[in-house]
Amino acid sequence: MVEINGTLLVQFINFFILVAILAKFAFKPLVGVMEARRKKIEGDLANAQATLDSAEATKKEYEAQLANARKEAQAIVEKAAQLAERNTQAQIKELKEQLVREKEEARNEIAREQAKAMEKMREDMITLSMAIAGKIVAKNMDSQVNVDLVKEAIEKLDSKALG
């Protein structure tokens, strides 16, 4: 069994002195270090949470900016499409006007050429008619009367053809 003697009593006293020394010089600084570490970890967690909140706010801001940029891009695309449509319509209108002008010029040119051809044909008919009439009435009429008769006949033919 356990003998109680002075050695055991001295060992208990030494143990309690050692515990008191450790409590004063080792336990309190160790607790202080652990408390400082706990506070640092809490600070780091709070800082991490603040950083996370800031990152989420920045993300939302960027998403809003991206949505705005998409809207602006869509508006630019629509504006470009409208501008292209207007330009196309303007070009079509200009081409139609040019086609009408060219058509009118062609009609005028045709009318001028037709008038020239009619005048040339009239002159040729007068010459031919005079030659024929000259042969028919060569001996009994003079050339001026022949010309007048042929012109009168051609004018009657022209008034019937044109009328």
Image (spheres, rainbow, N blue to C red):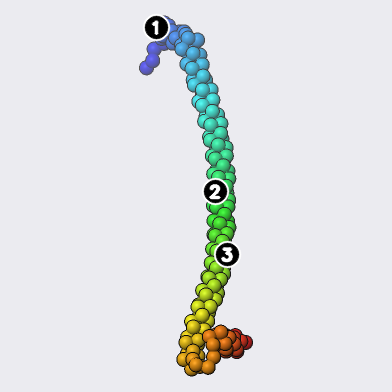
Q: Is residue 62 left or right of residue 26?
A: right
Residue position for label 2: 73
The residues bearing labels 2 and 1 have C-alpha atoms spaced at a distance of 93 Å
Decide if residue 34 is in sight here.
Answer: yes
Q: At 50% from the left edge and 14% from the top edge, which residue is drawn?
A: 28
Nearer to us in this view, 153 or 62: 153
Relative image position of residue 79 (x, y in whole percent): 58, 52
The residue under label 2 is which amino acid type?
Ala
Q: Which of marks 1 and 3 is in front?
A: 3
Q: How many marks?
A: 3
Q: Which residue is denoted by mark 1 in the rendering?
A: 7
The kind of secondary structure element at disc 1 is: helix
Looking at the image, is 139 positioned above or below residue 13?
below
The three-letter code of the residue at mark 1 reads Thr
Residue 15 percent across, percent down from the top left: 44, 11
Nearer the N terminus, badge 2 or badge 3? 2
Q: Which of marks 2 and 3 is in front?
A: 3
Which element type, helix, strand or loop, lies under badge 3?
helix
Visible residue check, residue 12: no
- Sequence-wise, which precedes: disc 1 or disc 3? 1
Q: Mark 3 points at which residue?
A: 97
The residue carrying pointer 2 sits among few (fewer than 14), some (14 to 19) or many (20 or more) residues within 10 Å by Cα, namely few
**For the view shown, which residue lies furthest in the left direction?**
1
Residue ID at (52%, 84%): 126
Compute the Cα span from label 1 to label 3: 128 Å
Depth check: give the residue in front, 78 or 129: 129
Q: Distance between the residues labelled 2 and 3?
A: 36 Å
Residue 64 found in image quarter:
top right
Q: Which of 18 and 83 is in front in this view?
A: 83
Disc 1 residue crowd, few under 14, some 14–19, many 20+, Cα 10 Å: few
